[in-house]
Image: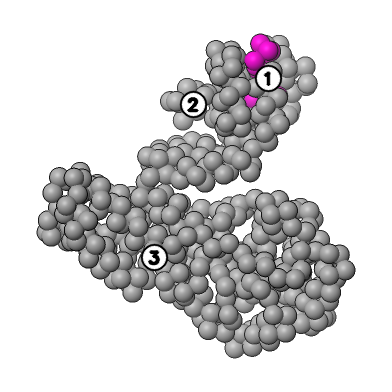
């Protein structure tokens, strides 16, 4: 996420953070580099100017000059100003109204609007324990209605059906009445998208908004469009009283221009980040944490929250008890570890959130076969229960059968068995109370080969 911006800013700031004394000259030089880094990241020019000026005024002030470590204070100023540009704190959804609370979701076609509706429904259901009804009023694209129905089934929320022959306003009002009867806490209305902003579309959505009076009006925008994302959001904001923005495809955005521009250009807070295709891949937006990640300081708080929310603690504790009793760490346990790590965004997703490990995550992404873990799971699924519990019996014809059944090569299977053996040895060494404590704390999430060094990671 935002690798290009992070690399440029980190290298620009590295030269100044170690200095014992700051002068106007070296501050100016660093700020020139920071300015270029932001412009190359497609941050809006007005935002860049304001950011650089704010940093300059604070950097030339007393808080830096009188400090014992002025370089470090300068870094803190940059971090603080980044947070300020993106919004000082996380702004949660406002659902303080008589149920059902209505959320209207708007955006251009292709921005990931319908998927975001499903992600938001899942988040509200699982994190906030809300009952949710979703409805599509996109009568121009029947496929969008079908897509939402499928996603609603996947995330386990109520779907209100609609058809292309109906009127958007009629659908929305009927869905809200339906939600009242079902005692739903929240109704999320997915509106029609277009390939570009047009007058008819804006008029229709403004009428819809006025009639159903949603408590939250969220604009979904693709981070990959950079500065255009902020401009599009501004155009929508002039028609609709937006309450926030969902920035999608953030995981694929190496620049970061949209994240740094949207708040300043529109005056509306970013409330969520879409960080992948899965319905679990929606994160509340925390400006302070993102600023920390951009500057290569990691995001341990988000990592801890992910462990709390996405890791199956019962499975982790069961494995901890099993190892403590001296029982064997088998391939079924190994598969569970792979699945837990996958839920956390894979090894690169975890490394990216650890302080100072952003560059290592980038190296891992470039050199690691990202499909390797999926192949490992498929190979384990192709084994019999006896083979999973007793990997030592997997020889000769068994290997051939497993690789044929999983579409892999014998060397892939040999690598898997070697990885498992290494992890098994590590588990044996940790079968005391320390193992149980670690597994409870981290939920058993551990890359194959163990923590610390490659250890068998197939780079």
**Residue 418 in the image: x percent, y percent?**
57, 18
Tell whether 244 sits left or right of 47.
Answer: right
Mark 3 secondary-structure assignment: helix
**Residue 289 in the image: x percent, y percent?**
45, 51
Residue 390 seen in render:
yes
Would you call the spot at circle 3 few (<14 residues within 10 Å), some (14-19), or many (20 or more)? many
Residue 5 position by quadrant: bottom left
Query: Does 337 appear in magenta?
Result: no
Would you call the spot at circle 1 few (<14 residues within 10 Å), some (14-19), or many (20 or more)? some
Mark 1 secondary-structure assignment: helix
Residue 38 position by quadrant: bottom left
**Residue 114 in the image: x percent, y percent?**
67, 65
**Residue 417 in the image: x percent, y percent?**
61, 19
Q: Which residue is label 2 attached to? A: 451
Looking at this view, name the residue that lies furthest to the right: 181
Tell whether 4 sits left or right of 442.
Answer: left
Q: Which residue is label 1 attached to? A: 321
Residue 374 seen in render:
no
Task: Kindly identify the residue that appears in the image at 30 percent across and 71 percent down.
Answer: 50
Task: Kindly identify the residue that appears in the image at 42 percent across and 44 percent down.
Answer: 298
Tell whether 20 sits left or right of 259.
Answer: left
Real-space Cα separation, disc 2 to disc 3, in angstroms: 36 Å
Query: Does 325 appear in magenta?
Result: yes
275 and 297: which one is in front? 297
Q: Is residue 407 above or below residue 359?
A: above
29 and 212: which one is in front? 212
104 and 425: which one is in front? 104
For residue 143, which numbered disc appears in the image?
none
Real-space Cα separation, disc 2 to disc 1, in angstroms: 20 Å
Q: Which residue is label 3 attached to? A: 85
Q: Which residues, given as a range, are shown in magenta?
A: 323-335
Real-space Cα separation, disc 3 to disc 1, in angstroms: 47 Å
């Amino acid at each position: 996420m935002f690798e290009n911006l992070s690399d440029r800013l980190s290298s620009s700031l590295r030269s100044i953070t170690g200095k014992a004394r700051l002068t106007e000259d070296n501050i100016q030089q660093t700020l020139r580099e920071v300015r270029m880094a932001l412009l190359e990241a497609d941050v809006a020019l007005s935002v860049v100017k304001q950011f650089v000026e704010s940093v300059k005024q604070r950097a030339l002030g007393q808080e830096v000059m009188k400090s014992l470590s002025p370089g470090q204070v300068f870094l803190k100023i940059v971090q603080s100003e980044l947070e300020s540009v993106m919004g000082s704190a996380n702004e949660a959804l406002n659902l303080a109204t008589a149920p059902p609370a209505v959320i209207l979701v708007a955006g251009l076609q292709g921005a990931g609007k319908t998927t975001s509706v499903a992600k938001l429904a899942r988040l509200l259901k699982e994190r906030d324990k809300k009952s949710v009804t979703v409805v599509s009023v996109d009568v121009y694209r029947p496929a969008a209605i079908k897509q939402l129905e499928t996603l609603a089934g996947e995330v386990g929320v109520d779907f209100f059906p609609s058809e292309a022959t109906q009127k958007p306003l009629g659908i929305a009002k009927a869905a809200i009445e339906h939600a009242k009867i079902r005692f739903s806490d929240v109704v999320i209305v997915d509106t029609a998208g277009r390939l570009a902003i047009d007058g008819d579309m804006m008029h229709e959505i403004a009428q819809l908004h006025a009639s159903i009076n949603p408590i939250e009006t969220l604009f979904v925008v693709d981070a990959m469009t950079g500065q255009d994302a902020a401009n599009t959001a501004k155009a929508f904001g002039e028609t609709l009283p937006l309450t926030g923005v969902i920035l999608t495809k953030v995981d694929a955005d190496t620049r970061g221009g949209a994240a740094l521009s949207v708040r300043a250009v529109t005056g509306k807070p970013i409330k969520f980040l879409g960080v992948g295709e899965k319905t679990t891949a929606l994160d509340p937006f925390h400006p302070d944490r993102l600023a920390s990640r951009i500057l290569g300081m990691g995001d341990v708080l988000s990592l801890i929250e992910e462990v709390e929310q996405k890791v199956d603690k019962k499975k982790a504790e069961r494995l901890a008890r099993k190892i403590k009793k001296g029982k064997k760490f088998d391939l079924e346990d190994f598969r569970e570890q792979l699945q837990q790590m996958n839920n956390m965004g894979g090894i690169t997703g975890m490394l990216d959130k650890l302080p100072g490990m952003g560059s290592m995550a980038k190296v891992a992404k470039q050199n690691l076969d990202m499909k390797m873990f999926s192949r490992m799971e498929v190979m384990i699924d192709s084994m019999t229960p006896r083979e999973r519990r007793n990997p030592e019996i997997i020889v000769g014809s068994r290997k051939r059968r497993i690789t044929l059944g999983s579409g892999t090569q014998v060397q892939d299977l040999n690598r898997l068995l070697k990885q498992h053996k290494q992890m098994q040895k590590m588990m044996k060494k940790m079968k005391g109370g320390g193992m149980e404590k670690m597994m409870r704390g981290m939920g058993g999430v551990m890359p194959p080969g163990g923590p610390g060094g490659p250890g068998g990671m197939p780079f």
